[in-house]
Amino acid sequence: MLITVVMIKEKIEIIKGDITRVQVDAIVNAANSSLLGGGGVDGAIHRAAGKELLHECRLLHGCKTGEAKITKGYNLPAKFVIHTVGPVWNGGTYNEPALLRNCYYNSLGLAVKNNCGSIAFPAISTGIYRYPFEQATKIAIGTTTEFLQQNNFPEKVIFVCFSDEMFSIYQKTLEEIL
Ligand code: AR6
């Protein structure tokens, strides 16, 4: 058990910054179900990737909450973008935790399927969709840990925090879970 924990801890990295600049095989986009762009991290990813990303997204015909779809990264340093749709926070009694968990699990599964050795996540649903930070972070790190216990791939999972506050919540939660 101790060996497993150490190995998983080595695969997880928490950084502060802009996900559009992270050099990994795949970055995850916190999209909406249209997959046609929006504000927050979604807007930043579309701006950095260029118009071709929107063209490919149009061919996907949307995405349900908790599910994930993959495109190329175009002008991004990342090879792929995995688009997932987080739940809107409505007090926690509308299946939000299970749906957010699905976002992480399905994104990681899609990364494996596409041979991505490294993947970077933003804090899905914690912006415009108002998911409480601590609860969302527990799901992000908890689900990822679970996935890494069951799969040898990806070899690196990076959580990209956009603020100092989020960065310290992620660090604290990682210590608590692992
Ligand atoms: N890099 C990393 N994290 C970022 C960046 C960035 N460049 N920009 C924002 N964040 P949000 P949601 C953080 O609102 O809550 C869009 O309009 C941000 O601080 O982007 O899932 C979509 O189209 C927050 O912690 O996504 C949907 O309609 C986190 O990313 C809706 O927003 C997520 O915030 C999705 O809302």
Image (cartoon, rainbow, N blue to C red):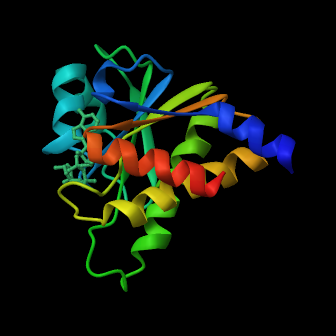
Q: Quadrant of residue 60?
A: top left
In the image, is 16 to the left or to the right of 6?
left
| Residue at screen point 49% across, 60% down | 138
Please state which of residues 130 and 153 is positioned toward the viewer in this rendering. 130
Percent coordinates x, y for residue 158 in the rendering: 49, 33
Q: Is residue 65 something that shows in the picture?
A: no
Percent coordinates x, y for residue 80 in the rendering: 44, 25
Q: Quadrant of residue 143?
A: bottom right
| Residue at screen point 31% across, 17% down | 76
Please state which of residues 74 and 152 is positioned toward the viewer in this rendering. 152
Farthest residue, direction bottom? 93
Q: How many marks?
A: 0
Location of residue 74 with respect to 152 vertically, above or below: above
Location of residue 104 with respect to 6 vertically, above or below: below
Q: Is residue 18 something that shows in the picture?
A: yes
Q: Quadrant of residue 33?
A: bottom left
| Residue at screen point 46% across, 55% down | 103
| Residue at screen point 36% across, 21% down | 73
In the image, is 20 to the left or to the right of 158?
left
Location of residue 64 with respect to 84 vertically, above or below: below
Location of residue 117 with respect to 159 vertically, above or below: above
